[in-house]
Amino acid sequence: MRVYESGKRFEGRFMTVFILPAKDGVHRLGVTATKKAIGNAVSRNRAKRLLREAFRLSRAELDAIETKFDWVLNARRSLLHTKLEKPLAEFRAIAAKVKGGNPSGSEGVPENMK
């Protein structure tokens, strides 16, 4: 709840990302996929797997960020209709924006990812 209330928010086509500086000095991940936004359990589990994998494959980009964050990724329905490459590119664009110190929304996300 702290991340939602006090953190920064980034909107993307496949996910909404909330970040808050971490107290323990490591990146931590939380993933949500609601029944209302995504649908049945099979779809929610697939969405969460895709988001966790995007986070895992972006470890090098995350390690390049000096400040460590608590990340909460909220899945969007459009995530179900794509392969891993597009959400991965979107997450990496958001991570690059966080590293660059521009936490003001979706302006750093490539146009084809919005």
Image (cartoon, helix red, strand yellow):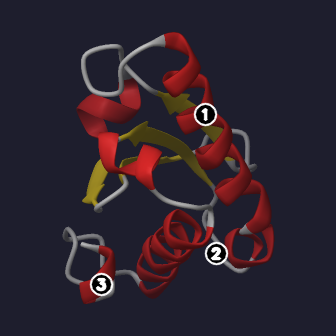
The circle drawn on residue 112 is 3
Residue labelled with disc 2: 65
Q: Quick check: can you spot residue 19?
A: no
The circle drawn on residue 76 is none
Q: Is residue 94 above or below residue 110?
A: above
Residue drawn where x is 29% and y is 62% of the image? 12
Q: Quick check: can you spot residue 59?
A: yes
Callout 2 amino acid: Ile
Residue drawn where x is 25% and y is 30% of the image? 5
Callout 3 amino acid: Asn
Q: Earlier in the sequence, mark 3 or mark 2?
A: 2
104 vs 45, left or right, is: left
Residue drawn where x is 53% and y is 45% of the image? 71
Q: Quadrant of residue 31?
A: top right
Q: Quadrant of the N terminus?
A: top left
Task: Give the x, y percent position of residue 51.
Answer: 59, 47
63 vs 101, left or right, is: right
Q: Earlier in the sequence, mark 1 or mark 3?
A: 1
Is the residue marked by circle 3 packed among few (<14), some (14-19), or many (20+) residues within 10 Å?
few
Q: CA distance from mark 1 to mark 3?
A: 22 Å
Residue sitting at the far front: 81
Q: Quadrant of residue 104?
A: bottom left
Task: Give the x, y percent position of residue 82.
Answer: 48, 59
Q: Is residue 25 above or below residue 38?
A: below
**Closer to the camera in the image, 74 or 77:** 77
Q: Is residue 54 above or below residue 103?
A: above
Is the residue marked by circle 2 packed among few (<14), some (14-19), or many (20+) residues within 10 Å?
some
Task: Give the x, y percent position of residue 26.
Answer: 75, 49
Residue labelled with disc 1: 46
Callout 1 amino acid: Arg
